[in-house]
Image (spheres, rainbow, N blue to C red):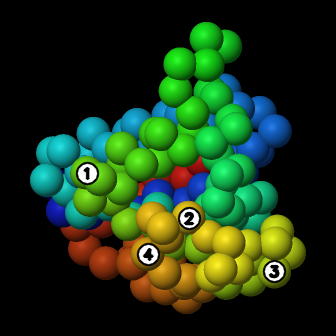
Amino acid sequence: MADKIVIMLLNLNPDVPGTLGAPFFQATVAAAMDLEVEIYFAARTTRLLIKGYAEQIHPGEAKEKSVYSFMQDAHEAGVKFYACAGAMAEHDLTQENAIPELDGIRGGGAFVGEIVEDNVVTLTY
């Protein structure tokens, strides 16, 4: 069994809110199962790390819970959030405007280094 899950958010589109709840919900479940979980935000998904951005997006039509609420649940469960260094400038994310849940900045080398380790499962969205 794996000890760690590394999730890459690369192909999700913040303009399609219905796709944004599942990765954070699944990360929360994995953390609750005592797995180490990291989420890497790349490309357009780095915008979710800007203060106020994910709070305005709701994955369900009922708008009961924002994407940011799902992100907070995951982080409170122990999930670590990392922004792609290369995508930050392109999508206006800075250390100053980032949500407090951002745990760090990591590039592609860090991601690849994690996913080639034994007992690590990788999910991409």
Residue lying at 42% horizontally and 49% vertically, measured from the top left:
72
- Give the secondary structure at mark 2: loop
* Label 1 close to label 2 by CB (< 8 Å): no
The span from disc 1 to disc 2 (Cα, nearest Å) is 16 Å
On residue 77, the disc is 1
Q: Secondary structure at mark 1?
A: loop
Q: Is residue 87 left or right of residue 26?
A: right
- Is residue 98 at all visible to an observer of this figure? yes
Disc with the residue nearer the chain's start (3 vs 4): 3
In the rendered image, which residue does mark 3 sit on?
89
Marks 1 and 2: which is nearer the front? Answer: 2
Number of other residues with Cα within 10 Å of mark 1, as a class: few under 14, some 14 to 19, many 20 or more: some
The amino acid marked with disc number 3 is: Ala
Image location (x, y in percent) of residue 52: 67, 52
Q: Secondary structure at mark 4?
A: strand
Crowding at dot 2, Cα within 10 Å, few <14 / some 14-19 / many 20+, comes out as some
| First in residue order: circle 2 vs circle 3 | 3
Query: Label 1 is placed on what type of residue?
Result: Ala
Cα gap from disc 2 to disc 3, whole angstroms: 16 Å
Q: Which circle, 2 or 3, is nearer the viewer? A: 2
Q: Please give the label number shown on residue 19.
A: none
- Label 2 sits on residue: 99
Using the image as rendered, state which of residue 91 and residue 35 is in the foreground. Answer: 91
Q: Few, some or many C-alpha atoms within 10 Å of disc 3 (few <14, some 14-19, many ≥20)?
A: few
Sequence order check, earlier mark of 3 and 1? 1
**Cα distance in 3D space between marks 1 and 4:** 14 Å
- Identified at 70% across, 38% down, the residue is 56
Q: Is residue 82 above or below residue 23?
A: below
Q: Amino acid at mark 4?
A: Asp
- Which of discs 4 and 2 lies nearer the camera? The answer is 2
